[in-house]
Image: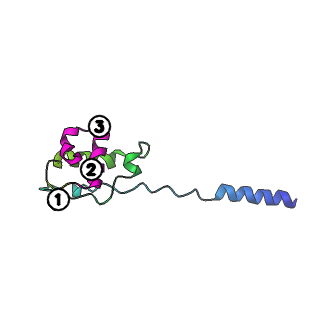
Amino acid sequence: MRSACLLLCLLLAACTAAPPPAPDPGPLFDAQGQQPLTCMAHQPQPPGPRYTEPTQRRTDETLPLLRYYTAHAAKPYCDGNGPTDTDRAWARLYVELGADKTKVAPLLS
């Protein structure tokens, strides 16, 4: 009886245990509020799994990235510097998502 009770308690504990936390999907792309821009801001962090893992991609998160580079990739960065390695990672992702490489070619060099 005691072992049956212990087994039941262990089974209940296993069934009610919280699932492990989901891995961090990484940062959201900063599309600068999708406002009219005269220059681009540097991205502070590289793309994470929410963009790089096809199973985690969401249209509402990838479309702002695609729109941003389609509209603004030819503009200079606001600080006057060239793209950082992080900016290049986002530009590569833009191409990997199927967008026109010529739009971001200057950012990739």
In-front residue for pair 23/92: 92
* Gap between marks 1 and 3 measured at Cα: 27 Å
Residue 20, image quadrant: bottom right
Q: Are discs 1 and 3 less than 8 Å apart at CB?
A: no
Where is residue 53? Give x, y as percent: 42, 45
27 shown above or below 98: below
Q: Secondary structure at mark 3?
A: loop
The answer for how far apart the CA atoms under marks 1 and 2 are is 13 Å
**Which amino acid is tagged 2?**
Arg
Task: Give the amino acid type for the residue marked by disc 1 in the picture.
Answer: Asn
Q: Earlier in the sequence, mark 1 or mark 2?
A: 1
The residue sitting at 69% across, 59% down in the picture is: 13
In the rendered structure, which segment of residues is drawn in magenta? 83-109
SS type, badge 1: loop
x, y percent for residue 24: 45, 57
**Residue 57 visible to the viewer:** no
Q: Which residue is mark 1?
A: 81
Residue 33 or residue 16, whichever sits in front: 33
Secondary structure, magenta segment, majority class: helix
Dividing the picture into quadrants, the one containing residue 98 is top left
- Residue that mark 2 sits on: 88
Pointer 3: what residue? 98
Q: In the drawing, does residue 92 fall left or right of residue 41?
A: right
Residue 69 included in the magenta stretch of the image: no
How packed mark 3 is, by other alpha carbons closer than 10 Å (few <14, some 14-19, many 20 or more), is: few
Q: How is the image coloured?
A: rainbow
